[in-house]
């Protein structure tokens, strides 16, 4: 089912529109390089906390446990390669975007696709909140005096990212290219410099901080390694964003998106493995109050200019990583709206290829999360990454079926491995973080699915009532009556009566007359009656008495009484309103027309038309 008015009116199709679309909108789409800046910030920023997540888990087994940092990271890099290869295939097979939602819809059924969509929506919203709070946390660590204003700082960063994205995703790519380049260059420089050192250049960053290290274990169990693997997989969040936003790229969109996906995977893999090698090379141990990345920058570049460049670039990129959600979620919401699982307003696109309602929705929900959490990143992290792993798993399972149908068992085996690894990660992450707040995500996902289903049923009922998709009965002439509420004789009254005479077979002007003995009201009613007879517009004036000085209710009662008589096939109420030349002049209006229209829509079945006459 398709909404015949919003979708058809907002996105016209046809031979006359096709030639102009690419020319007018292409410059507002992404290049392959721009896609890295606009859609990969989440994945890039995960370098700041992915290796740390692994180290913190393995530290429970002491130095022996930390020795497994590189093998666990290599396993995550292998999974990254599987995901990149898989999403590269997803981009080719589903160039309209949607990622896991599109794959699950095609191969796993509608209910599975809604679960995938719900998981992606939850992950995108949480990514914004976590990224912004993490970036502000890095800032307040450097400037402790700002800690008390962290909520306002978070909202300020969110407002900047939202404002940039309202100008288009290509604009956001231009704004965020420089921070992305500085971050990647600084991390690669850190890795290269560290590989040429036999000993740490400095340990000043960790000096005076207590080590977070358990007693040395005689053996490292599989469960601990599994937990470290699942925690480190947080570095993979954002890998799916490119596949979700394929329509945002310039033509050929699928090929450009594939190039971006491969570049993202290569950069992320090199940085993760490089940092893991340095962790083992410098025998790094986690300490309280200092990040692993800060220790690595200190050890590789010394406690000087390079160290502060890495810290500043990390703080900026963490804050801007929210941009990935602004690039991916509006496209997903558009697909859900197109399939009647969300209001069709989310399918509307403004100029510059902006899904404005999706951007504003994401900003609003994220702002509520930021205020609710008090700008505390630790209260949001336990909720993070669960949704994306569910989406990963469903996407991999869907691609397994895709390749089995295409009789490509080798590719199906690759996706089967990916499904197994991401499924295990999803279970472990959910289990380990359930009591810390992950239960909220587990509750939110089915509620989102129920919301999608409810919206879909509402659109189905609407389609049935308007007989969408069926040939309607023959067109016949209907006898119609048009009522025009009036309160005086003005140019507005004349224009409304002229319009009404062109709309209906019979036109009547109606006015509400208070029945209380107030002299002023009585004189006003008599003056209107006298002036109407002098003007003689050829339209009768009907007075509706009301003892309570109400505006809309007497008109609604009169309309219902006329409908009960069944003398006319169609009743229309034409409400005239003045459209002032400036928006601020609307504040001077009495809103009488809005009150009448609102009451009529609630209490009658009449057609309500608001005639706005521009002054």
Image: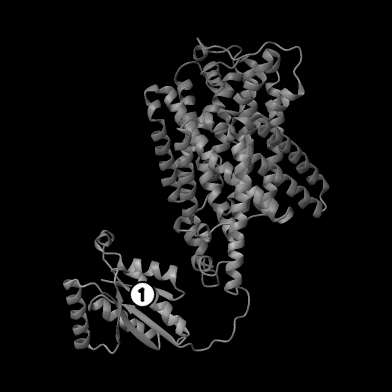
Q: Is residue 88 visible?
A: yes
Left-right relation of 408 to 540 = right
Say if 583 sits above or below 571 in the image. Answer: above
Which residue is at the front of the view, 576 or 319? 576
Which residue is at the front of the view, 346 or 252? 346
Residue 43: image x %, image y %? 58, 36
Left-right relation of 603 to 475 = left
Give the image quarter of residue 232.
top right
Q: Which residue is mark 1?
A: 555
Identified at 70% across, 32% down, the residue is 428
Identified at 70% across, 11% down, the residue is 216
Identified at 73% across, 52% down, the residue is 108
Q: Is residue 93 visible?
A: no
Residue 511: image x %, image y %? 29, 77
Q: Secondary structure at mark 1?
A: helix
Which residue is at the front of the view, 241 or 388? 388
> For the N terminus, which image quadrant?
bottom right
Say if 530 sits above or below 113 in the image. Answer: below
Identified at 45% across, 85% down, the residue is 565
Residue 553: image x %, image y %? 36, 70
Residue 547: image x %, image y %? 29, 71
Say if 324 sits above or below 71 in the image. Answer: below
> For the C terminus, which image quadrant?
bottom left
Q: How many marks?
A: 1
User: Crowding at label 1, few (<14), some or many (≥20) Cα neighbours within 10 Å?
Assistant: many
Which residue is at the front of the view, 519 or 567? 519
């Amino acid at each position: 089912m398709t909404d015949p008015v919003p979708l058809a009116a907002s996105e016209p199709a046809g031979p006359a529109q096709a030639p102009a679309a690419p020319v007018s909108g292409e410059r507002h789409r992404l290049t392959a390089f721009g896609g890295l800046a606009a859609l990969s910030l989440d994945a890039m920023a995960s370098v700041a906390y992915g290796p740390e997540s692994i180290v913190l888990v393995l530290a429970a087994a002491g130095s022996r446990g930390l020795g497994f940092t590189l093998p666990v990271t290599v396993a995550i890099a292998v999974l990254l390669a599987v995901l990149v290869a898989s999403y590269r295939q997803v981009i080719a097979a589903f160039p309209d975007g949607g990622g896991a939602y599109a794959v699950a819809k095609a191969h796993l059924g509608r209910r599975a696709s809604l679960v995938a969509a719900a998981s992606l929506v939850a992950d995108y919203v949480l990514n914004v909140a976590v990224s912004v709070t993490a970036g502000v946390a890095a800032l307040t660590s450097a400037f402790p005096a700002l800690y008390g204003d962290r909520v306002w700082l978070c909202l300020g960063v969110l407002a900047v990212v939202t404002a940039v994205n309202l100008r288009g995703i290509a604009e956001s790519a231009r704004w965020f290219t420089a921070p992305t380049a500085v971050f990647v260059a600084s991390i690669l420089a850190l890795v290269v410099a560290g590989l040429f050192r036999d000993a740490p250049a400095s340990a000043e960053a960790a000096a005076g901080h207590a080590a977070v290290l358990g007693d040395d274990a005689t053996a490292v169990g599989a469960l601990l390694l599994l937990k470290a693997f699942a925690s480190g997989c947080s570095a993979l969040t954002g890998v799916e964003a490119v596949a979700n936003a394929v329509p945002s790229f310039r033509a050929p969109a699928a090929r450009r998106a594939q190039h971006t996906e491969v570049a993202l995977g290569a950069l992320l893999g090199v940085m993760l493995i490089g940092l893991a090698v340095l962790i083992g090379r410098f025998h790094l141990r986690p300490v309280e109050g200092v990040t692993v990345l800060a220790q690595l920058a200190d050890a590789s570049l010394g406690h000087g200019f390079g160290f502060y460049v890495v810290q500043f670039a990390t703080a900026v990129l963490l804050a801007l990583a929210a941009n990935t959600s602004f690039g991916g979620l509006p496209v997903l919401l558009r697909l859900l709206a197109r399939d009647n699982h969300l209001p069709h307003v989310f399918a509307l696109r403004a100029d510059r290829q902006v899904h404005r309602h999706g951007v504003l929705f994401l900003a609003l929900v994220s702002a509520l999360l930021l205020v609710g959490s008090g700008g505390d990143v630790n209260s949001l992290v336990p909720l993070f990454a669960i949704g994306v792993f569910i989406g990963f798993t469903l996407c991999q399972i869907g691609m397994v079926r895709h390749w089995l149908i295409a009789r490509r068992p080798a590719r199906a085996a690759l996706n089967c491995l990916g499904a197994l690894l991401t499924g295990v990660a999803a279970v472990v992450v959910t289990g380990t973080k359930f009591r810390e707040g992950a239960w909220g995500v587990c509750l939110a996902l089915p509620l989102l699915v129920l919301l999608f289903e409810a919206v879909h049923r509402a659109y189905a009922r609407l389609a049935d009532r308007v007989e969408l998709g069926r040939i309607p009965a023959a067109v016949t002439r209907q006898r119609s009556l048009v009522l025009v509420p009036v309160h005086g004789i003005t140019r507005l009254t004349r224009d409304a009566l002229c319009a009404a005479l062109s709309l209906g077979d019979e036109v009547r002007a109606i006015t509400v007359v208070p029945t209380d003995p107030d002299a002023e009201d009585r004189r006003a009613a008599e003056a209107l009656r006298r002036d109407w007879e002098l003007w003689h517009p050829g339209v009768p004036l009907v007075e509706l008495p009301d003892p309570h000085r109400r505006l809309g209710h007497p008109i609604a009662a009169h309309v219902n009484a006329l409908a009960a008589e069944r003398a006319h096939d169609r009743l229309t109420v034409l409400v005239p309103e003045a459209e002032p030349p400036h928006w601020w002049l609307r504040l001077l209006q009495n809103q009488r027309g809005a009150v009448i229209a609102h009451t009529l829509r609630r209490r009658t079945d009449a057609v309500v038309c608001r005639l706005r006459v521009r002054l």
